[in-house]
């Protein structure tokens, strides 16, 4: 039983340290006071940079091969448009530190997180440029995906900021480690913050099904005098 209790205690300790290193038991009240006097309070900044991609064109069949899109959403092996995004999370942490003894150190983390998109590609089938109505219909659709991605990133940045501040205030003060352990403690904080940012973004990035569904596909077959399937099939632009 003791063994199990210990494992549970370790699991809880690891859970508590997600987002913000846990320190409460490591410093005596006197040490905590000393660290608070010597160190500035911890600092958290979370910024986000929305994507503003340009539209690129590729022949619809080449586009389908590039993105390996499921056949359900292709028109005879071609696709009308495609958007993909890859979130980038940059976590920068510097530490104001105070040496309590040769083996004990406390630090205040200065955390700065940037959320951006390493990739945000918007493609539209080049055949559609012959028909402004069809081309703009697909551009609008793909740009709505970009808007959803940007909105998810904004919400994720706000939620991450609140979570980090909550941790900071719950801990009420500097974090204890050893002089040798400082770099590792910062690396672990960076890694857990980045993992959380990706998880929170994924949870918010859930709007795409609103515009990618059977009803919207049926509409895209019919809009602009059914120009989209015709152009992707290599048929000439319909009159009018
Ligand atoms: Zn779509």
Image: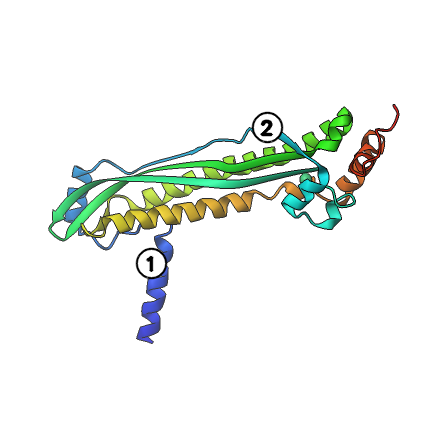
Let me know if residue 210 appears in the view.
no
Give me the residue at 22% from left, 43% from top. 107
Circle 2 Cα neighbour tier, 10 Å, few/some/many (<14 / 14–19 / ≥20): few
Name the outermost residue toward the bottom.
1
Mark 1, ligand 1, within 8 Å: the answer is no
Give me the residue at 67% from left, 40% from top. 63
Does residue 38 appear to the left or right of 42 in the view shown? Answer: left
Name the outermost residue toward the right.
239
- From the image, tell me which residue sits under label 1: 13
Is residue 5 shown above or below 202? below
> Residue 7's spot in the image, x, y percent?
34, 68
> Residue 112's spot in the image, x, y percent?
36, 36
1 and 2 marks in contact (CB < 8 Å) = no
Q: Quadrant of residue 37?
A: top left
Nearer to us in this view, 21 or 128: 128
Is residue 72 shown above or below 139? below
The quadrant of the rendering that contains the N terminus is bottom left
Nearer to us in this view, 73 or 125: 125
Question: Does dot 2 land on a helix, a strand or a loop?
Answer: loop
Q: Quadrant of residue 90?
A: top left
- Looking at the rendered structure, which numbered label has been put on residue 119? none
- From the image, tell me which residue sits under label 2: 54
Circle 1 Cα neighbour tier, 10 Å, few/some/many (<14 / 14–19 / ≥20): some
Give me the residue at 68% from left, 30% from top. 139
């Amino acid at each position: 039983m003791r063994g199990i209790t210990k494992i549970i205690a370790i699991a809880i300790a690891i859970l508590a340290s997600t987002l913000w290193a846990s320190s409460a038991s490591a410093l005596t009240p006197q040490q905590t006071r000393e660290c608070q006097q010597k160190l500035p309070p911890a600092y958290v900044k979370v910024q986000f940079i929305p994507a503003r991609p340009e539209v690129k064109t590729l022949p619809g069949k080449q586009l389908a091969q590039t993105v390996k899109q499921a056949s359900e959403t292709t028109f005879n092996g071609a696709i009308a448009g495609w958007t993909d995004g890859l979130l980038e999370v940059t976590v920068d942490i510097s530490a104001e530190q105070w040496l309590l003894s040769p083996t004990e150190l406390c630090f205040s983390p200065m955390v700065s997180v940037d959320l951006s998109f390493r990739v945000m590609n918007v493609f539209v089938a080049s055949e559609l440029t012959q028909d402004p109505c069809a081309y703009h219909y697909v551009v609008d659709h793909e740009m709505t995906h970009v808007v959803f991605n940007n909105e998810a990133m904004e919400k994720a940045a706000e939620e991450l900021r609140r979570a980090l501040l909550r941790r900071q205030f719950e801990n009420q003060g500097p974090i204890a480690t050893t002089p040798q352990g400082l770099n590792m403690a910062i690396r672990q904080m960076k890694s857990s913050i980045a993992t959380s940012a990706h998880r929170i973004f994924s949870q918010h990035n859930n709007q795409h099904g609103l515009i990618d569904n059977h009803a919207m596909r049926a509409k895209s077959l019919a809009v602009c005098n059914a120009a989209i399937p015709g152009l992707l099939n290599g048929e000439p632009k319909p009159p009018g």
